[in-house]
Image (cartoon, grey):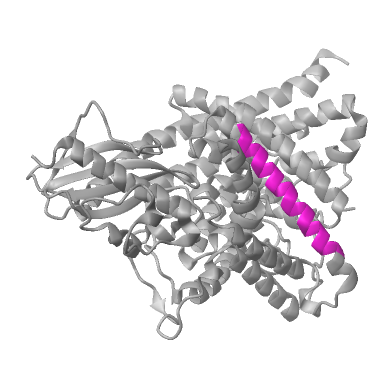
Amino acid sequence: MKFVIIIISMVLVNNYPLAQFLGICPFLGVSKDLNSSTGMGIAVTFVMVLATAVTWPIQQLLNRFGIGYLQTVVFILVIAALVQLVEMFMKKSMPALYKSLGIFLPLITTNCAVLGVCITNIDSSYNYIESLVNAFGAGIGFLFAMVVMAGVRTKLVDQSRIPESFRGVPIVLITAAILSLSFMGFNGMFS
Amino acid sequence: MTKNENFKEYGMPVVVLVAICFVTTLLLALTNSVSEPIIIKNQAITATANRKELLPDADDFTQLELDKYASSSDGMANVTEVYKANNDTGYVMTCITKSFGGDLTMMVGLDATGAVTGVKVTDHADTPGVGTKDQDPEYLAQYISKTALSGEDVKKEADFNFITGASVSGTAIHKGVYAALAQYAELGGAK
Amino acid sequence: MEERKRIDVLLNGLIKENPVLVLVIGTCPTLATSTSVETGFGMGLAATAVLVCSNIVISALHNIIPDKVRIPCFITVIAGFVTIVQMLLQAFVPSLYSALGLYLPLIVVNCIILGRAEMFASKNGVLDSALDGIGMGLGFTLTLVIMGTIREVLGSGTWLAGDWFGLAKGFKGIPLLSNFIPGMSIMTMVPGGFFVYAIVMAAVHYFTKDKSKIRNEFGCDGCANAGNCADGECVQK
């Protein structure tokens, strides 16, 4: 039950791009059409779970030696190496998957949502399983936000007359504002 | 490829990266050795100041070493530290309770009659905005001079102005106060 | 480089290539920490410090660092400076440290810093890179302060409230609006962040309409990974 609550809260209440300001860059940049936003969302979910699976034990190791202050350096390096590794592995053994997901992988290293979820898991003192579930939930939440955003944006470009100054990025931000406003309705769902 | 070229191709990157990591670690260790004592000292000063704020009549505090600390019935909120005023005016307890974004640390002051003199949140990982509305002094002041709570459910508390949007952290704080009152009862009042 | 060009390098980041409003990078910390002038200003300064230091180190080392491990090396340097700033803030300005919270370690993945390392510092000299860092950092700070002002004044009715690095403990702020209307707290929350960002950017578009080429789409220019993005093919194209 606890896991279900974690996932639902990460998808709806604590949605990363729409309620926590994490992963905004890809959320705004890659949400132009449905295909690329789904691809990006799945890739992020995958890397988030993988990164959490690796960084959580590492933090325990750092704590044991009393060098917890190396957290940021170690985490970001591990994530960067991990992404590179996954990309190489995918390219070699799963070319079809690489074609649809692989192109998003290099963008993920500098996605603050991935590092954010790893650090949040440590800060919230989740145990290993909870951390993995939390990372999965965060990824799904990101995917969900991306898909919704892409849906709105496709309509936006085709069918509306937008004031000149608002064309491009500003109107996307306005869309995001309205989306996040509606997501605020989920606030206080769990008590 | 000659040996030299081989080294340039594969050896150099490794050497440079390792060297940079090494230097970074050294610098971090150095900064840490400078900043850590200050951080610990600051935390001690703020903690004492917070305790004084919650229990203004106290002159100074002594930490009590207890075998058993009180918790809320679901184990979400735990008393971790009990400080006794040296002039017997009361206690200040530190509780760690599970809130939305993770652990929430709070202090509860109790006077010699067992009434709450103040509640203060000292550390939290909640989303600023709605999630921290119930950390405002005005909200927390509602606990002042209560000697008992109706229960662990904040919504069942009479005459209580509860913040709907922040139910998780509101409940967390409520359970913390509940645990502190239980701890007080266990201590058998101020002696 | 001549003196004129140096000034250009410095001023570029402030207006013409403002990282947040024109290049559209570093959006997460911009939205998250512009809830008040104080947090925005603190975030801006912290990021500027990291940016200047990392730009200097990277431009000094760019001849030694092999191309293959370029990105990991940059990241390590940046992460090191971020952690140092984090520790110093925790020791000397604890109020700001707790106000920035998670977004402080996340400076590491702020695209502005890696982006400038990749695009400017690894190709230019130490002095120019330092100037570029200062310019970009100030551009970032300026935007954060503007957005912080709008959000704080509309959201809580006051301006410049905060501890200000311990200089003005518990300063309640200048009551610009709070005497007339209650604060619209939505402005300090998530939707307000997106909304104010959009308005500020639209204003910039409006006023620079004829003067410079405005960017209407997200592209690879500001992206730190443009170089190694899917073998040079950016997702955008």
Q: Position of residue C182 (x, y in %)?
A: 45, 79
Q: Residue furthest bottom?
A: C180
Residue ID at (79%, 71%):
C214
Residue ID at (56%, 54%):
A189
**Residue A134 is one of the magenta-drawn residues:** yes
Residue ID at (66%, 28%):
B17
From where the camera sits, is residue A14 visible? yes
- In-image side of B189 versus C145 (left or right): left
Where are the magenta residues, as a range? A132-154
- In-image side of B33 versus A132 (left or right): left
Q: Nearer the viewer, residue B165 or A91?
A: B165
Q: Position of residue B34 (x, y in %)?
A: 37, 37
Q: Position of residue C75 (x, y in %)?
A: 64, 39
- In-image side of C220 versus C140 (left or right): right
Query: In the rendered image, which quarter is residue A18 located in?
Result: bottom right
Query: In the rendered image, which quarter is residue C146 located in?
Result: bottom right
The answer to whether residue B72 is above or below residue A88 is below
The answer to whether residue C71 is above or below residue B110 is above
